[in-house]
Amino acid sequence: MQKDKSLYRVSPLRLGVFIYSGLAACFTLSYFLYIVISGNDPYNKFMTTLLVTFMFLVPFFAHLIFGVRVSDFVITFYVGFLTVASLLGQVLRFNNHFPWYDKFCHFAFGYVGALVGLYIMCKLADYRKTRPALVFIVTFAVSMACAACWEVMEYVSSRFLGQTAQGSPQETVSGALIVDITDTMLDIISNLGGALLFLAHYALHKGTKRSLLLGAVIKDFCADPAGDMREREETAAE
């Protein structure tokens, strides 16, 4: 019984991330409730604030379900990227204040999506026996799939929920209202750039046989914290 509990121990770093994530969720939830109560939503943040609130709660659920199997690095990286891309970019409207910020986030999302693919490979396969070509294919595919899912979500929110994730409707000469798909295509191209940057980074990592930070990331992704903890406890018991 004690061994099971040990899988859910909270390190100081994880505790700090939980506190920050909880405060961020409270902030976005407060913003959401303000919109609901006042009906004042000039920037169309109704769905965004609600979604970001749930996203900031993901680390808590991940810890409750998987414990230390999801490492401190993964949780910290997730909350950090969520802060940059969603809290600052969407909720606090950095995308509106800085014209380049949205495309920067999509570019970064392309790289992060490839990291997600790498994480999946480390968990579902023996990375040491995996050919680099397969890593290239899977990470690139996962990154572009993440971009496609994101754009589908933006389309659904704009088409059926009255949001403006794909831009405000523009009136044509015939009087019809349409949404220009240029922003969507630029988002996908930006994501593609981030995915290609990851592939270049990975190629340098493999070609030079140096860590280049990716080595540390792969080591963390492929580690089994739960197994290591059980092994240490069994050794101590002996």
Image (tube, grey):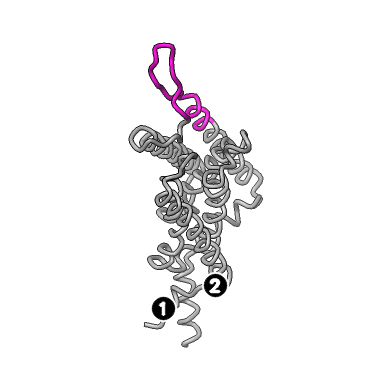
- The amino acid beneath tag 2 is Ser
With respect to residue 60, does 214 lie above or below?
above
For residue 11, the mark is 2
- Residue 144 in the image, given as x and y percentages of width and height: 46, 36
The Cα–Cα distance between marks 1 and 2, rounded to whole angstroms, is: 14 Å
Residue matched to label 1 = 5
Q: Which SS class for mark 1?
A: helix
The answer to whether residue 166 of the structure is visible from this angle is yes
Q: Position of residue 198 (x, y in %)?
A: 57, 41
Query: Is 204 on the left or on the right of 184, as rendered?
Result: right
Q: Could you tell me which residue is drawn at 43 percent across and 25 percent down?
A: 179
Q: Earlier in the sequence, mark 1 or mark 2?
A: 1
From the viewer's side, name the closer residue of 167 and 111. Answer: 167
Q: Position of residue 191 (x, y in %)?
A: 52, 35
- Is 186 within the magenta? yes
Give the residues drawn in magenta, as a range: 168-189
Please say whether residue 179 is one of the residues in the magenta stretch.
Answer: yes
Q: Identify the residue at the far bottom of this view.
A: 238
Q: Label 1 sits on what residue type? A: Lys
Q: Residue at x 46, y 46 (%)?
A: 117
Q: Quadrant of residue 73?
A: bottom right
**In percent of the image, x 36 and y 36: which residue is there?**
156
Q: Secondary structure at mark 2?
A: loop
